[in-house]
Amino acid sequence: IMKIMFWNTHKNCGINKYIASLIIDNSVDITVLAEYEDEEQELLNLVTYNKKLYKKYITTGCDRIKIYGNLRGVEPAIQDKFYSIHIIDKEFILCGIHLPSDFHGDMGNERKQIIRTIMHDIREHEKNLCSEKTIIVGDFNEMPYSSGCMSADCFHGMQYFQCNQKPTREVLGEEYRKYYNPMWNYFGDFNGPPGTYYYHKSTLYSPMWYMYDQFILGSGLAHKLDHDKLRIITSCSIGDLSTNKGIPNCKISDHFPILCDIEV
């Protein structure tokens, strides 16, 4: 089992104890962080003290993503401002992302341009490795149904996966490979918080809850996901990550972390 966690830590200091607690509580193998600005060595010491033997993976060239883990055989591939790609055991492609937000205006077109570049790089690695065992994880700053996440020429993250389905979808005579986005399963209030990020705008249209933090899996791993272990995490052994209203506690982070288990 490969356990992967992502968390946008909101540039907060004093968050290491929460990250370390989550890693230890859940036996996390790979931790991908966005907006991480706490003391890195302190984090590694906290985790290593508990015999997890964590190390930092090389993300030089990508200042928006940091990646740590206890797996060996992890080699850096393409590093860009908005994404960091690593190859695990010459078989798995891990891409951590933190895309631009709409906080200062609509960045949808810019995100799609970045996403197309990401997918071009990922497909090149898939081709070179003869592998479709791809994991894209991070803060997408889009909902799963948004154009960048769903469009065939972007992430093409479908809301369902069947082993016998056609792996591609044809659009205007061109075949586009499909990927699987399991975060669709977390819309609504049946399994916990209805999103990973909360923002209440005084406008007529305001979802309030946003599913910005997501996993997207290639067809080589989609059927290996343990759906029962896919989670939006709201607490750890140190304490709650939410306020008494059930929304992310911004003193810790304005996002909830997410976790998945993949059978490898």
Image: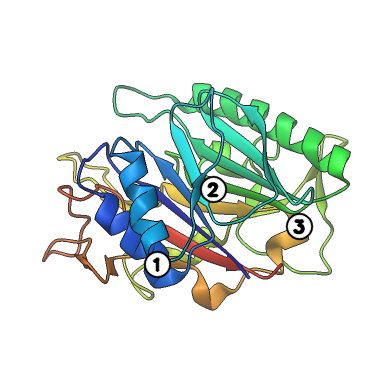
The answer to whether 42 appears left or right of 93 in the picture is left
Judge the density around disc 1: few (<14), some (14-19), many (≥20) Cα neighbours within 10 Å.
Answer: some
Residue 68 vs 153, above or below: the answer is below
Residue that carries the numbered disc 3 in the rendered image: 219
Marks 2 and 1 sit apart, C-alpha to C-alpha, by 20 Å
Residue at the spot x=79%, y=37% of the render?
125
Marks 3 and 1 sit apart, C-alpha to C-alpha, by 29 Å
Q: Amino acid at mark 2?
A: Val
Quarter of the figure with residue 102: top left
Residue at the spot x=52%, y=78% of the render?
228
Residue 183, position in %: x, y? 50, 59
Marks 2 and 3 sit apart, C-alpha to C-alpha, by 15 Å
Residue 28 vs 134, above or below: the answer is below
Residue 175, position in %: x, y? 85, 41
Work out which quarter of the rendered image holds the N terminus and state it. Answer: bottom right
Residue that carries the numbered disc 2 in the rendered image: 137
Residue that carries the numbered disc 1 in the rendered image: 24
The answer to whether 240 appears left or right of 20 in the picture is left
What SS does tag 1 mark? helix
Judge the density around disc 3: few (<14), some (14-19), many (≥20) Cα neighbours within 10 Å.
Answer: many
